[in-house]
Image: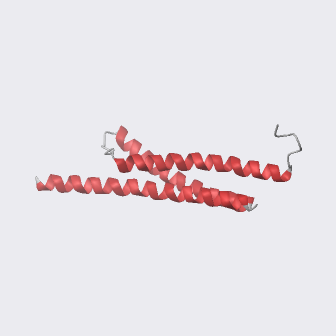
């Protein structure tokens, strides 16, 4: 009986480590997105885009882990839904959304700087 509890505990611990890895990657991506936006405000568009590439790499790594979890679930391996997993997915989805918004904000900033709006354009 103790053996099965030990195995269950090890299984939970292993899954939690996976969930924490997603949180770390996605959290770092979110930080990079905001760093890129700061660079944009200072007019450093190429630097902002470079930072967003780093954010994208982390998001992609987290997505690969997520796909492994989805594949395990499809094969009948219990993924152990938990608050930690829910938080990991929330952080990942938010990081992706913020990245897409940042790309558009950077493009908008750059286009306005290159072609300032004429009086009355914003009416």
Q: Residue at x 81, y 49 (%)?
A: 112
> x%, y% of residue 20?
40, 57
Q: Nearer the viewer, residue 84 or 61?
A: 84
Q: Decide if residue 16 is in sight here.
A: yes
| Camera-nearest residue between 39 and 92 | 39
Name the side, left or right, on which 42 lies relative to 17.
Answer: right
2 lies above or below 94 = below
Q: In which quarter of the image is residue 46?
A: bottom right
Residue at x-position 44% and y-position 51%: 65
User: Does residue 85 appear left or right of residue 97 in this picture?
Assistant: left
Report x, y in % for residue 121.
85, 40
Give the residue displayed 18% in from the left and 57% down from the top. 6
- In x, y percent, where is residue 34? 61, 57
Residue 44 placed where, x, y %? 74, 62
Measured along the vertical axis of the image, is residue 44 above or below residue 76? below
Quarter of the rendering occupied by the C terminus: top right
């Amino acid at each position: 009986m103790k053996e099965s509890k030990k195995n269950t505990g090890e299984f939970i611990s292993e899954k939690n480590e996976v969930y924490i890895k997603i949180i770390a990657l996605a959290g770092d991506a979110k930080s990079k997105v905001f760093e890129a936006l700061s660079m944009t405000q200072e007019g450093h568009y190429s630097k902002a885009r470079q930072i967003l590439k780093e954010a994208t790499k982390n998001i992609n790594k987290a997505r690969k882990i997520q796909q492994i979890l989805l594949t395990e679930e499809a094969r009948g391996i219990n993924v152990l839904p938990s608050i930690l997993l829910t938080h990991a997915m929330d952080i990942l989805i938010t990081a992706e959304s913020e990245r897409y918004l940042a790309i558009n904000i950077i493009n908008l900033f750059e286009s306005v700087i290159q072609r300032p709006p004429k009086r009355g354009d914003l009416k």
